[in-house]
Image (cartoon, rainbow, N blue to C red):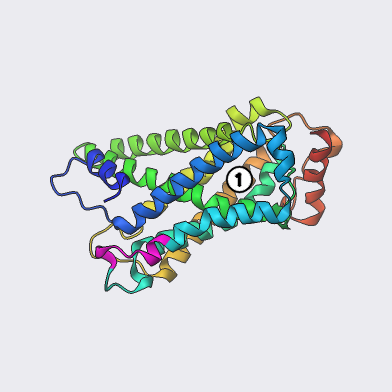
Amino acid sequence: MTPLIWLGVILDRRSKFVPVEGPSFWSLVAVSFCIICFVLTSFRNLIFKSTVLADILDFKELEYFILAFVSVAPSFLIPLVFVCKADKGIPLKDRYWVKASFWIVIFSYVGNYFWTHYFFTVLGAAYTFPSWRMNNVPHTTFLLAHCCFLLYHAVSNLTLRRLRNSISHLPTKLRWLLEGAWILALAYFIAFLETFAISNFPYYEFVDRDAMYKIGSLFYAIYFIVSFPMFLRIDEKPGDKWDLPRVAVDALGACMLVTILLDLWRLYLGPIIPVPETKQCLQSGLPWFPENAKTSDAYDGWL
């Protein structure tokens, strides 16, 4: 058993705790955690804080893509090659880690392809490192997001399950209130932590970094306020095993709800930074449409 499974046992006081995710899932989560630590500490601190090493390595589009690909590949290959005892004899499509990974793939893809443009138009963010792009979003972030989101949702599963067990004796309305408060707090904490963790990366820039930490983290937390309780539902009820089509529908439903909430923020709250009237994001349309994309290009000129 991996350390994360033991953590789950500690967090859950039931006499017989059997994590629905299974050893394979927690193994790939542990791998994702190690990869994130590598990217955020070793790579960032040793390379980007040292102009000498940065000049020597001279990362371009290919190097950034290879870094991201090497980072995400183990989270799929390790549970696929090293099959745990619990997964032996189970078809690949019915294994929990496959369903969870599929859910996260959909969620992270939509998040990068569509929601990154809200970071451009609402939060005043910009990616400036050399990278091949799709819809003006670096391919690197598509891949790295999978590792991050997998870890975040694994932590959410552990804590939400423990919370539900602890407050199961309370009235229903109070349980809903406490669970909602925890989801909001955890979502904001993770959003803030990620934003702060990559603060030394010189190619992810903001017009107002302080506003991004405080208010932008709340905007980012909308992702997880929706996704944490929905992701937990996968295979959670005994005897109710999900198939991949159901996983896809659920993930896409979560994506649609997040998109609606982000766009309501854009329309009614607007950017979190002072924006000249000539550069305000349009009130109609969507930020990834060509006529609105010019707003994100304008931010690049301020940074």
Q: Is 298 situated above or below 136?
A: above
Please state the horizontal and vertical placement of residue 52, each as a whole percent of the image.
71, 34
Quarter-of-image position of residue 239: bottom left
Q: Is residue 80 magenta?
A: yes
Please state the horizontal and vertical placement of residue 44, each as a whole percent of the image.
60, 37
Q: Is residue 117 magenta?
A: no
Q: Nearer the viewer, residue 100 or 295?
A: 100
Q: Residue furthest right?
A: 278
Please state the horizontal and vertical placement of residue 280, each as a whole percent of the image.
79, 39
Q: Residues within 10 Å of mark 1 (few under 14, many from 20)?
A: some
Quarter-of-image position of residue 270: top right
Q: Nearer the viewer, residue 214 or 284?
A: 214
* Secondary structure, magenta segment, majority class: helix
The residue sitting at 23% across, 39% down in the picture is 10
Q: Is residue 170 visible?
A: yes
Classify mark 1: helix, strand or loop.
Answer: helix
Task: Look at the image and give the residue range highlighted in magenta.
Answer: 78-87
The residue sitting at 38% across, 43% down in the picture is 155
Q: Is 193 situated above or below 31?
A: above
Quadrant into which the C terminus falls: top right
Q: Nearer the viewer, residue 73 or 287?
A: 73
The residue sitting at 73% across, 50% down in the picture is 60
Name the residue type under label 1.
Leu
Q: Residue furthest left?
A: 15
Q: Is residue 253 left or right of residue 143?
A: left
Q: Give the labeled residue for mark 1.
A: 262
